[in-house]
Amino acid sequence: MAEIVTLADAIAAAVRDGDTVAMEGFTHLIPHAAGHEVIRQGRRDLTLVRMTPDIIYDQLIGAGCARKLVFSWAGNPGVGSLHRFRDAVERSWPQPLELEEHSHAGMANRFAAGASGLPFAVLRGYRGTSLLANTTGVADIVCPFTGETLTAVSALRPDVAVIHAQVADTRGNIQYWGITGVQKEAVLASARSVVTVEEIVDSLEPRPGAVVLPSWTVDYVAHVPGGAHPSYALGYSTRDNDFYLGWDEISRDRDRFSAWLDEHVYGARPQVAAGAGIKGGAEC
Amino acid sequence: MLTYTADEMMTVAAARSLLNGMTCFVGIGRPSEAANLARRTHAPDLVLIYESGTIGAKPGQVPLSIGDGILAETADSVVSVPEIFNYWLQPGRIDVGFLGAAQLDKFGNINTTVIGSSYAEPRVRLPGAGGAPEIAAACKEVVVIVRQSRRTFAERVDFVTSVGFGDGAGSRQRLGLTGGGPKLVITDLGTLRPDPETGELVLAGVYPGVSVPLVQEKTGWDLAVSPDLVEIPAPAETELTALRELLSPTPSAARQLAVPDGAGPAARRPVGEGVLS
């Protein structure tokens, strides 16, 4: 059964130095507040896993939390580069970052294999690309029925999954909807999980198309309204596109980034303000 | 007299390549803009599919990201990310994949990963693959939209993120890629199509006021010219009006026009030959 705790307690209990951590959410429901708590608690040597390591991982990488990144698209969606990510890869600042790079289809299937308790998943993918020579966890496999050569990708089994959802009930059952991404697979593939939520209610309202993660599949639930900002939670908030645009400027410069981190992450109380200080980035 | 930029001409040409009723797997940035323009003009029943799992999205304005809420709220169906790739893209259900590029070579291979000869020590680190490798592999056809320069249009890409025609004719079959590969490349100067025999991209169309030598000058390989070269009509007033309306509600959306950033200045630039009219 999930325990309902503070965000600080959830991260302290679930995320340890050296862990492989998957913070998921495909543009929607990105667990920014939880990422900030990981930075505040000073976690180090993490292997960060995420299909789209956007601003949240730019911040964790720039803050020196990450040793390795497992990913398929590292950019600021609709805006351009992730400058902290690029600084780490191109100039090893603040430290070198090892990369394990895939395609979205590959990563999605790796999470699905992990959730399924299988060592690998099969897809048609990667054929003819330079990714094959530059990554791990991808191999040819021959179909035992047709003889067709397909691609196998190794399962992802993170130590911890961290996601944000719209609602939990008081027993810790989780419900989220809209763009549901790969969060279910990430939680079921991981040994431990933390879920931050917009709202805790007495009982979940049945909602067609929503994903429900029963309480017994989750370890820690924390009530963090606005915890996805500058991403969004459908029905609760809209995507703060101005923050994504503003991040391009803040993140270009090491000093400006560090000052932003000091003010808005280290200087912030837990559960407050993922997006303060940027026009349109109201406190969440 | 209608005045328009090369970027507007490019987006309009890209929109025209999409036919009503098609299913289209849309990349973010200019592909999304062109696909939404097509839906607003000649192709109201174009089915827009985004890798965020939104099928049949009908946004009223161009979304900044592939996961904006408006996509889910207006979609016929929203599915998980594993499902969109496994059930919808992989079996070849999608008519056209619409992609951007940071670098493109003469066989239509796309690089969005690194610039420079070393993967481990790249000169420029780009965002990476995203959904593109499997979109390029599995869609019945692929349309690429990218601004043209010698640096961007290379003899061979530094890194093959997504396969076009590989090393040339027969490569896709040898690799077992099920989709048809690039059918059309749309730039800010004109359009390129693959030679059916060799798979090499040749110049198929130029915009009004653009000369063939200029396009060749801005191509990093010896660009052949199709015997059927056409001049592509300038944007009609209806197209320009629809495009500007599509963009006007979100001035910030202008920022998304850049192809995956990192290869150089992302700022919009004026047309190479001055304003066309």
Image: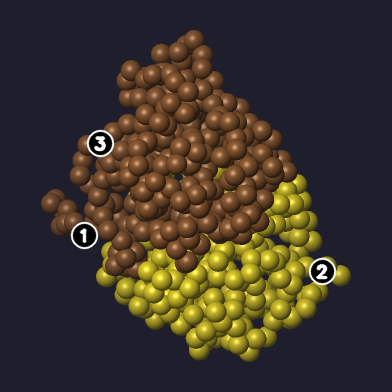
Task: Answer yes or no: are tags 1 and 2 on the same subunit.
Answer: no
Of B182 and A197, the residue lying toward us:
A197
Measure the C-alpha gap from mark 3 to mark 1. 20 Å
- Chain identifier of the yellow chain: B
The residue type indicated by label 3 comes to Ser
Residue B61 position, x and y percent, is 68, 46
Would you name the residue on which mark 1 appears? A140
Which amino acid, mark 2? Thr
Q: What's the mark number on residue A224?
A: none
Q: Amino acid at mark 1?
A: Asp
- Decide: is A48 above or below B269: above
Q: Which sits in the foreground, B37 or A188?
A: A188
| Mark 3 and mark 1 on one chain | yes
Q: Position of residue B56 (x, y in %)?
A: 54, 42
Q: Are marks 3 and 2 on the same chain?
A: no
Do callouts 1 and 2 mark residues in contact (Cβ within 8 Å)? no
Q: How much space separates mark 1 and mark 2, taking CA atoms?
A: 53 Å
Residue bearing the label numbered 3: A116
Q: Secondary structure at mark 1?
A: strand
Protein chain holding label 2: B
Q: How many marks?
A: 3
> Marks 3 and 2: CB-CB under 8 Å?
no
Percent position of residue B92, x then y: 38, 53
Numbered disc 3: secondary structure? helix
Is A54 placed left or right of A245 in the picture? left
- Above or below, A16 against A122 in this view is above
Circle 2 residues within 10 Å: few <14, some 14–19, many ≥20: few
**Residue identified by numbered label 2:** B3
Residue B218 in the image: state x and y as whole percent.
60, 83
